[in-house]
Image: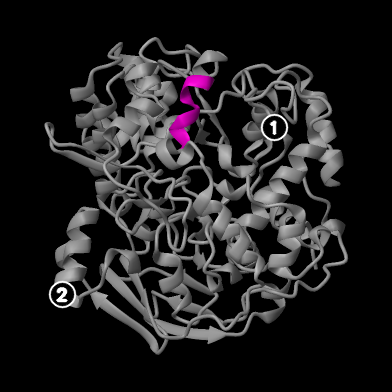
Amino acid sequence: MDSQATIMIYSTWPLLTVDLSAGERNTEEIDGILEQYLGGRGVGTRLAHERIPFDVDPFGSENRLVFSTGPMQAAQMSFTGRMNCTGVSPLTDGLLSSNAGGFMSRNFADTGYSAVELTGESDELVILHVRDDGVEFEAVPDLAGATVPETLEYLDAEHGIEADQTAVIGPAGENRVRFASIMTSGERAFGRGGLGAVMGAKNVKGLTFAGDSPPDIEVPLIQTDIHREAATADHIMKRQGTVSVMDLANEVDGLPSYYFSEQSFAGVEGINGDAVESKKYKKGTCSACAFACKLPTQDKERGVETEGPEFEVAMAFGSNSGVDDIVDVMQSNELCDRLGMDAISAGNTVAAYLASEDAFGDTDLIHETVEKIAHREGVGDTLAEGIDRCYDDLGVENWTVKGMDFAAHEGRVLHGQGLSYAVANRGADHMYATFYSVEYPLVPDEQAVAPEGTLGKADVLVERENLMALNDSGVVCKFSRDFMTPERYEQLFDADFEDLMAVGARTVTLERHFNNQRGFDRTDDALPYELPSFEAALDEYYDARGWSDDGTVPENTLPV
């Protein structure tokens, strides 16, 4: 497929495998994989491709969860406080990686492992304490059904373990809600795709990480320039996070509303960036990051405190649910974090239910339904399956791709983003390629790609997908885009940019090949709406990837 040239700076630590069925753990060197995939998503994908049976049940004991970090955890640079988790998704039924920020990544790196892999299934509810000198299995039957805060309170009281050292699930994960999340640092999530339900199926309530074996990697001094620029930049995301784009999205008829039936929202001022900023009470950030784009918010009058909502959640629980009060959306966000659910999928699924009941804007019903989903009570048992599995029962349209519901960036307006949703290996997720970032008409004369049309965008889409996979392997936050250049990637990783992008290409190809073995092909690269020249654009994309015209990866092109 490519020369697979050596990357000079990559993770160098072993893999820890924990067999939950046998109660065993072992370590092994994976230098060859690390050298070709850096860390993070790349390494998680390669390990999963080798070790998870192609026909695995996502809730079966043979599914694996791979937590992995990357070489940039050795840096003290903005945009590096992130982690990866990989497994077969119960929501999409395909191989999927999820990415979380916060402060766990460096605690994880201090254990001295590049990746920690869970396989098998425990016969009792456990917390795994991962240290640089071993793994402790702690039976925690009394935590069955505990919320995320309750679990964190236990870990602090009994062990003095802080939230930043943890990855835990709430009742949604234990109850196998197909969009359950794994929560870290209390309010950060491995969110999309339901890997929290996989952890619940393995009977693991949480993991903790600590040690004194930090990575011995010398990161080039360019990290100092990037960090300084992140600290001094005057950027609206420092005040309003991603929700800062909401007014623009609404202006271009690109804000999904009322369960995707409309594309603008009259009550946008109640949930936009200014509304969120008015509730922000302090700065929020991830480990080592001076960009500080997170949104700790509170409303003392109603007793609500959370982090966010970001744009996607403000859409899902706001405009898409017919809600125009930011405090109501904050409460929905807090409920999802507490119960351990992806707030995007939860909000969109609730919106589907509201559409079926003609109950848009009913916030009491929304919050009641969120609770029911997490505990699979009443209608919540149906909704916990996700839109793709319950839309027919609700009598609504199926607004998903590969089982994953849509993010906020509107593919009916940003056609390249629409194409991206269709071909993304993990479904209708905006972060897989972040194609929206080159299509929004922020400065019309300078935008990289016109939003109209799908033809001629395949090469850019492939480049974006590869770059995002590289970031997830590094691990470097995708919001570093205003500060990173090809030259800076080369300096950080001491490698040619072309070789680095090949890491991303290999990762995307292995994801696609795994999913092909599970039956995914061109027919799954589909949208619930029409885009101009869509089928021809698919041909262009497959050709740019070197894949067959049925959307499958030829065996002779697989990375070796």
Is residue 270 shown above or below 103? above
> Quadrant location of residue 560?
bottom right
Which amino acid does the dot numbered 2 rest on?
Answer: Glu
Give the amino acid type for the residue marked by disc 1 in the picture.
Thr
Of callouts 2 and 1, which one flags the residue occurring earlier in the amino acid sequence? 2
Figure coloring: one colour
At 34% from the left edge and 16% from the top edge, which residue is drawn?
A: 322
SS class, disc 1? helix
Q: Nearer the viewer, mark 2 or mark 1?
A: 2
Q: Is residue 81 left or right of residue 485?
A: left
Q: Quick one: 452 or 67, which is closer to the camera?
A: 452
Q: Residue at x 43, y 62 (%)?
A: 287
Where residue 94 appears, as percent x and y from the top left, is 58, 48
Residue depicted at x 17% and y 67%: 154
Q: Residue at x 67, y 16 (%)?
A: 530
Identify the residue position indicated by label 1 in the image: 523
Q: Main SS type for the magenta part? A: helix
The range drawn in magenta is: 242-248
